[in-house]
Image (cartoon, rainbow, N blue to C red):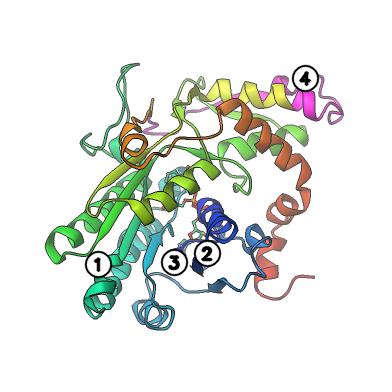
Amino acid sequence: MNVLVTGGAGFIGSAVIRHLINDSTHNVLNLDCLTYAGNLASLVEVDRSERYNFSQIDICNKEAVKKVFSEFKPDIIMHLAAESHVDRSIDGPAAFIQTNIVGTYTLLEAAREYWKALEPAKQQLFRFHHISTDEVYGDLHGTDDLFTEETPYAPSSPYSASKASSDHLVRAWNRTFGLPVVVTNCSNNYGPYHFPEKLIPLVILNAIHGKPLPVYGEGNQIRDWLFVEDHARALVKVATEGKVGETYNIGGHNEKRNIEVVQAICGLLEELAPVKPEGVEHYANLITFVKDRPGHDLRYAIDASKIERELGWVPEESFETGLRKTVQWYLNNKGWWQAVLDGSYQLERLGQGE
Ligand code: NAD
């Protein structure tokens, strides 16, 4: 099958593409405009595959998207392209409205035209898989409740509100126009190739450079963490075996307070990187509490029983094994994150790098 992945140069999209190329026989086209979050260095291990291609296109550009559809002829679209960082959505919401809402609308319209013109057998096979977040549900204040596929939407940030809007558009294109869609809502991901503005890579890299480890408020916010490769396996399963019109929640049953996550990283670094930066006696001494983010959600936790029951997906990594792999990956892959930190990954994409 031909699988079009939007946002394939990002954190989760690149994991999906590595999984599709390494563990399936599908052809993959990565459609990504390469914002600051897009990094082709995350795809070096599949770059030479004959089944992989890349097209630098903005999902808001309908004519370019239509041309890609008519040339590549996708059987499945896995839509991950998005602006994804909550703090950036507070500082500048416009890009989130543009890519997450207008971009998804543009892609849906191009997909609808393309799908309508397919022969009936191909129409039956076609899937538009929209990848979304559990943040659309708002937050939980009790300790036992979980987000299910029926939880009403109550997004808090410009990011989650823009993702909620895109989820509604995708479902409307199914209900009104019959476009065969599937939707997934997933909890917080972590793992290799994560852009160092996000909590886990930021803490790892700040710690090994002897810089403060910023923790919002008192670090009591609870997130349900999932290793990115487990998410990638779940997504490919839903895209190929999910039921049209259905939503699947994806999560790792790993609820942790932010402060616990930061302390766990410090503990792993004590073991895996015992030679510390000058003046640092214990990595945990670098923890610094900072003013909380406005509108910060307290707790997210996912009930993933539907995808486990109906599609037989379960996560393979526990938080302990996944976090250890992640910390070790950052220690072993200085070249990848150094180019991100010094900005040279953006020059390379323009052909100006060395
Ligand atoms: P990311 O920010 O790492 O990557 C986003 C990718 O989309 C980048 O490669 C970027 O260049 C590309 N992109 C952005 N705007 C584009 C546009 N207009 N046209 C084409 N490409 C564009 O994001 P991620 O963390 O990999 O998240 C991927 C998807 O998964 C998002 O839709 C996000 O909402 C969702 N999600 C993320 C998490 C998480 O923990 N990271 C959890 C659940 C769901």
Instruction: Identify the mark nearer the N-term, 3 or 2.
Output: 3
Pointer 3 residue: 3
Residue 31 shows up from this direction: no
Q: Which mark is residue 124?
A: 1
Q: Amino acid at mark 1?
A: Gln
Q: Earlier in the sequence, mark 1 or mark 2?
A: 2
Q: Amino acid at mark 2?
A: Thr
- At 60% from the left edge and 30% from the top edge, which residue is drawn? 214
Q: Which mark is residue 282?
A: 4
| Residue 46 is a magenta residue | no
Which is more N-terminal, label 3 or label 1? 3
Q: Vertical placement of 178 versus 190: above or below?
A: below
Q: Which mark is residue 25?
A: 2
Expressed as whole percent of the image width and height from the top left, the position of residue 97 reads 34, 58
Q: Earlier in the sequence, mark 4 or mark 1?
A: 1
Between the residue at mark 1 and the residue at mark 3, the CA separation in whole angstroms equals: 15 Å
Out of 247 and 269, give the one closest to the viewer: 247
Q: Which residues are magenta?
A: 269-298
